[in-house]
Amino acid sequence: MATESVAVTSRPADVGLKREMGLIGATWSSETSIIGSGWLFGALFASQAAGPAALIGWVIGGVAVIFLALVHAELGGMYPVSGGTARFPHLAYGSVAGISFGFFSWVQAITVAPIECFAVMQYGSYFWTGLYDPTANGGKGNVTALGFAMTIILMAIFTSVNFLAMRLFNRVNAGITWWKIAVPVVAIIVLAFKFHGSNFTAGGGFLPYGWKALFGAIPSAGIVFAYLGFEQADQLAAEIKDPQKNLPRAILLATFIGIIIYCLLQVVFIGAIPHSQIAHGFAKISDPQILAGPFAGLAGVVGLGFLASVLRLDAFISPFGTGLIYQTSTSRVGYGLARNRYYPQAFSRVDRNGVPWVSLLVAFIAGLFFLLPFPSWHALVGLVTGASVLMYAGAPLALGAFRRELPDAERPYRVPGGSVISPLAFIIATMLIYWSGFEVVWKLGVVIVIGYVLIAASMAFDQNRPPLDWKSAQWLPFYLIGLGIISWQGQYAGGAVKAPLNTGHIPFWWDMLVVAAFALVIYYWAMASRLPKGEMLRLIEAQSGIEPPERNAV
């Protein structure tokens, strides 16, 4: 029993990383991820998909993210380890769940840098028309060969900057983030003077395309994507000073700032757009300047030339900052997976600046593969959102398991009503994946299968690989396959260009009831299958520098 008492208070500890980031730096690491290319495109795509009711979509998305952020705040305070989202399920459910959610985290992280590069190319085409072809892909737009080459160069720059020591990287990121927050705030204030309240009932009314379109817009139009990144402080937790206090504060502060900014941006975008553009509905917006660069184009159309110039400059800086921090977090997630012995041990190597350099270089190379089948911002956003929310789904499960097995563990931040918020957050995450549509879900499934094969090959050559905890993750294949079947039979196609592959057999509204019930069944199945206390403590101690007890010890 003495061993167990010590273990409850022990914490995982990463090797080679340096704690050089304070509260502001931690907050900005999340905020610079939230305020990225999403603000440049989200308001337009959400309006086109849902009309003025897009504002409700931003509120619903914001509430969903708050629940998920609360969960991550408690987990990050408990166990401030690098690549936290990839490691919480490992500590709660063992290797099989850890491998799965760890890989989901890594896929989510490596896809964000390419999408931010696409945003730079699309806005940059205003100055250099050869970067992007708005008429390609049936009018949806694609980067050109030149744009593709410049995207690779930009990703290489992200990687190079990440070789700086964290204290220097933190200064670069902080400067970029101050700018990134200031510009949308200025845009909100200036565009408010061009506000027309009648726009909220123009072009078919406030909810012209119905509730189904509204819910579908939350993941597919970039709303959830725009909010992504609140968990970045968790990914960098091993490099944050006093993480038990600073990490939860950073996550929650960044989340609330992001929600306020995005909701106000949607309000002023709808209110300032010329009535001639929406007389036949928001889906019929046709001005080429607005379509190429929504906020910069809108500023130019309404006679705010100086603001348009500032916004086009920001179209380089905002995505650059987000791509930069995601390249950072991808390398830390890879580091964390190597620490769990799921990835090759080379991923855990760090240089003299505390940078996991092998993981960083692999993140660059892997990110390039996602440029090929997804040659535009809009084409990639659905997959990024699906992978992100699948990653987020592991955190509520981990929180519920820790609350049951480790009730006395130190929690610098404790989520009020955690027993209710935890299953609710899991339902929300599952619902967001469903709303992404079957086109996204099946592609994500292919990526997952490939990932399992590669990880299995890596672990096969590791003599110290962890044993596979199948029993505690027995619910996982049923969750992944079941969600795929519901998506196939459900109402959301997910941006299919050709005839949708989903059948639509489950009626609208009933489909969401089915998803919620399915998520609850999986949640409580996972709670019943969680690792026992002794096994959790063994996994925690194995990464804390304390000699681990024998397996199955209580």
Image (cartoon, rainbow, N blue to C red):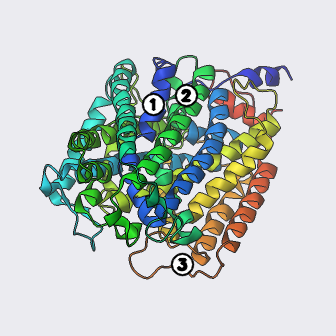
Is 196 left, or right, of 482 in this rendering? left
Name the one closer to the observer, 286 or 524: 286
- Residue 4 appears in the rendering: yes
Which residue is labeled 1 in the image?
A: 29
Lower sequence index among marks 1 and 3: 1
Residue at 41% x, 64% y: name it: 48
Residue 424 horizontal/vertical position (percent) = 72, 51
Lower sequence index among marks 1 and 2: 1
Q: Taking 344 as reference, is 224 above or below it?
A: below
Q: Tag 3's secondary structure? A: loop
Q: CA distance from mark 1 to mark 3?
A: 38 Å
Residue 110 horizontal/vertical position (percent) = 40, 47
- Residue 357 appears in the rendering: no
Q: Tag 1's secondary structure? A: helix
- The residue carrying pointer 2 sits among few (fewer than 14), some (14 to 19) or many (20 or more) residues within 10 Å by Cα, namely many
The amino acid at mark 2 is Ala
- The residue carrying pointer 1 sits among few (fewer than 14), some (14 to 19) or many (20 or more) residues within 10 Å by Cα, namely many
Which residue is labeled 2 in the image?
A: 250
Tag shown at residue 502: 3
Residue at 26% x, 40% y: name it: 307
Q: CA distance from mark 1 to mark 2?
A: 9 Å
Q: Tag 2's secondary structure? A: helix
Name the one closer to the observer, 361 or 223: 223
The amino acid at mark 1 is Ser
Asked whether disc 1 touches disc 2, contact meaning CB atoms under 8 Å apart, the reply is yes
Q: CA distance from mark 3 to mark 2?
A: 40 Å
Name the one closer to the observer, 381 or 390: 381
Q: Nearer the viewer, mark 3 or mark 2?
A: 2
